[in-house]
Image (tube, coloured by chain):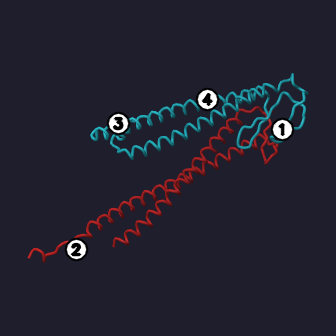
Chain colours: A cyan, B red
Amino acid sequence: MSQQQVSITDLDLTQLADVRRQLEEELNHLTNSFAQLKQAQAKFKACIENVAEIKPANKGKTILVPLTNSLYVPGKLSDPEHVIVDVGTGYFVQKTRTQAVKHYTAKVEYIRANLETLQDTISKKQDNVNSVIGVMQAKLQQQQQPAS
Amino acid sequence: MSLQLQAKLKTASAEYQRLQADLSNVVEARQRLDAQLSENDLVKKEFAQLAPDNIIYKQIGPVLVKQDQAEAKSNVETRLEFIKGEIKRVEAQLRDVQSKSDKKKNELVEIQAALQQTAQQAPPPGAPLPSLGA
């Protein structure tokens, strides 16, 4: 890290601008990933809530099953004990409700851990961007002082 | 001489650009494989902790088809093997393209240096004019 600090003060303004642009691109990419992870986490959390609705008390009740986004057919909840969970790569597994909740909680936790590391990376990257901007401003001031 | 060098520079830089494009393609493929690897790894872990009465379905188009647990497990296993193999292949490709592009870069620098040299050597032939001094 200190090596980078030394080298950025040696760069001229255009090079610094390039470095800044590159860093900002990386930062953008990372924040996008962060938002996507957040969305995925919210989806899994919603799944936990949905599974909680499939309880024995709701057995036999009428539900509307979506065939497409805009077409629903009425159905009845016949098996309140089992749900089918998408585990990825085209595989689905039939689980009991408790197993499903456990699965989704694990997923949420997994994403939370990833979000944390990503957050660290983002703040480090942000620090880098800030230091580059700081050096740029210092150089700009240096350039302006002899002129005035 | 300088024209020749300039033509050489042009082809070399075109090749360099092509190599750079190749490189970014390969890097992209590598990243895709990584994503697939981690997804399949997750599925494998998921399968490992299933109870025997958990029924596995495989999605084929819009329908879910029941599949044997053992079969699904071995499927994921072979997929993982395949992806690992692909990653090795792509990494070899990556190294190959990288070294080619480095070589091309050196070549470019050399050509540019040679061009500068010929540009500096160009003036002397017209310079000495002895008739003025006498």
Mark 2 lies on residue:
B126
Secondary element at tag 4: helix
Q: Amino acid at mark 3?
A: Ala
Q: Residue at x 60, y 51 (%)?
A: B85
Looking at the rendered structure, the number of numbered marks drawn on it comes to 4
Give percent across and percent down for residue B39.
Answer: 65, 41
Quadrant of image for the C terminus of chain B: bottom left
Nearest to N terminus: mark 3 or mark 4: 4
Residue at mark 1? A66
Image disc number at residue A112 = 4
The residue located at (64%, 28%) in the rendering is A109
Badge 3 crowding class, 10 Å Cα cut-off, few under 14, some 14 to 19, many 20 or more, is few
The quarter of the picture where the N terminus of chain B appears is bottom left
Measure how far apart labels 3 and 2 are at the Cα level: 48 Å
Q: Gap in Å between the C-alphas at discs 1 and 2?
A: 87 Å
Mark 3 or mark 4, whichever is nearer to me: 3
Q: Are marks 1 and 3 in contact (CB under 8 Å)?
A: no
The residue identified by callout 3 is A138
Q: Are marks 2 and 4 on the same chain?
A: no
